[in-house]
Image: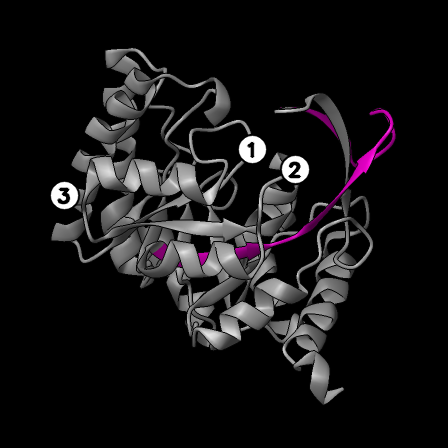
Amino acid sequence: MKFAAFSGVFIDYSIQETLRMTKQLGLDGLEIAAREPHLSPTTSVQRVKEIRSVADSYGLELPAIAGYMGGFSTGSDSECEKAYEDFCRMLPIAGELGASMVRVGAGGPNAFLAKDYHYAKAAYWLNRCAEEAAKHHVRVILEIHNVSLVETVQDSLRLAALVNQPNLGFIHDAGNMYITDTDYGRESVLTLGKHLFHVHVKDEKRVEAAGAPGTFANLTKHGQEFFLQSRMGEGGADHRPLFDALRETGYDGWVTLECHAPFPPYERLEHDFRFVKELLVPAQAK
């Protein structure tokens, strides 16, 4: 496994400073959030080349671009066309950066509220994305995420079957799946199988109310719930079964650290990387 920082954690810093801190943390690479001041579909070729040059100088890989384009399931035709065009603009950027994956969003609503037409509409546009991405040798990744069509592994496989493109797969995110209250352990990894392209890790914790730093509200199958963004090991998501399963299946892809807990960005990722390295050691070997 290789480990990356999520640049969205450092969104208040320049991309150059973010790359420097990523190297200082001892990580292998940076997953770039497609938001300014880091990156966007309109970023100039010159700036993209500069980002690649700085990453190379630190010996860092740039495995994925975390795009925010999508919303296909509920968008108007013109909105979907715009999202698709933005996605297409990211593909040559990915090539220049050496990124093999670009994230896109299917849209909402929560899977348990979605209708068949939501999945059909999303699948149409995702199929177009996957076909175009294949021309650039790029894989399309969708994050298993609360308040989306792909809140669970089963939702993800439903959408994958409708798209049926080998270069479309999913980001396993135990923190998001904890919010959804679905399995994010061994069975989730085994069931995703070949559709598991990437992994995000972060921790969350159910709380009584929102309002304190790092808290937020979310609609789940249980109704309106409240959560606290946490450092790993301090929330409610147990990542041990996930990492045991990743070892069991021989996963050799990327794991991105994406902590948004109310601590300074460097401090929270430093904490989470230490925690993850402990999870790489089998429990019985300790």
Residue at left offset 53%, top offset 53%: 15
Q: Amino acid at mark 3?
A: Glu
Residue 215 lies, in percent from the top left, at: 79, 32
On residue 179, the disc is 2
Q: Depth check: 183 or 22 in front?
A: 183
On residue 146, the disc is 1
Which image quarter: residue 67? top left
Residue 125 within the magenta-colored segment of the rendering: no
The C terminus sits in image quarter:
bottom right
Is the residue 82 above or below the residue 9 in the image? Answer: above
Q: Which residue is mark 3?
A: 131
Mark 2 vs 1, N-terminal side: 1
Q: Give the spatial CA distance, label 2 vs label 3.
A: 32 Å
Does the CB distance between marks 2 and 1 fall below 8 Å? yes
Q: Is residue 204 left or right of residue 48?
A: right
Q: How many marks?
A: 3
SS at badge 1: loop
Q: Depth check: 104 or 58 in front?
A: 104
Residue 200 lies, in percent from the top left, at: 54, 54
Residue at left offset 67%, top offset 76%: 277
Crowd tier of the residue under label 2, counting other residues whose Cα lies within 10 Å: few below 14, some 14–19, many 20 or above = many
Q: From which residue to which does the magenta span run?
A: 196-219
Mark 3 vs 1, N-terminal side: 3
